[in-house]
Amino acid sequence: AWYPGQAAGTALADVLFGDYNPAGRLPVTFYQSVDQLPTFEDYTMKGKTYRYFGGDPLYTFGYGLSYTTFSYSGLKLPETVKPGDTVPVAVTVQNTGDLAGEEVVQFYVSDVDASAPVPIRSLKGFERIALKPGEKRVVEFSLSPKQLSLINNDLKRVIEPGIFEVSVGGMQPGGARTTAVVTTEVITGRFEVTGKVTEVNNGL
């Protein structure tokens, strides 16, 4: 329950006795051990937080459980886009269990071909939805040009041509332990930015 506050007893009792279907998600990464982290003197972000940690955490950023189950299908995104285009993404989420519940749909992006250091993954959006048993809903996100950009070796914010991977689901993609979560799943797809390197201005 982490830091549940003064109403912790009532809240936990509601969850344990099934009066409330939990839908909270972790806002941080829980590591298995401090041995998984760089030394304290290392002030870079490498190996830290969900964005740069490549190991197997105890609980991932965005982790959470439910008394029902959710499935993801029909991921829609363009195959190719040009620098400066907004990228639309849509996915169908269904409550496949026997109880009503809430799902936190998380939208992550990874720059596969980046020429400069970038995060392993970045959360670009999320939406909490309530679904009855068997109910489906299409959830939509969009990626702005700035969200696809990086700071290159010349310290300019640019959009580079290359492959980007999109992951949408009820948890952070990657990590062996996330595959053991049976209440939700993650669906992935890719699109390609074509054209030439384009500098991003403040208006994008």
Image: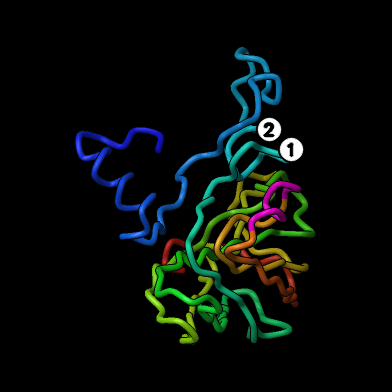
Q: Identify whether 95 is placed above or below 172.
A: below
Q: Where is residue 169 in the image (x, y as percent from the top left)?
A: 58, 67
Q: What residue is rendered at 62% in x and 49% in y? A: 151
Residue placed farthest to the left in the image?
Answer: 6
Alpha carbons under labels 1 and 2: distance apart? 8 Å
Residue 28 circle label: none
Q: What residue is rendered at 48% in x and 60% in y? A: 66
Q: Is label 1 in contact with label 2 (beta carbons under 8 Å)?
A: yes
Image-based side of 80 in relation to 122, left or right: right
Q: Residues within 10 Å of mark 2 (few under 14, many from 20)?
A: some
Judging depth in this view, the residue of 153 and 121 nearest the camera is 121
Residue at mark 1: 55
Q: N-terminal of the two: label 1 or label 2?
A: 2
Q: Where is residue 5 in the image (x, y as percent from the top left)?
A: 25, 35
Q: Identify whether 81 is placed above or below 126.
A: below
Judging depth in this view, the residue of 197 and 116 nearest the camera is 116
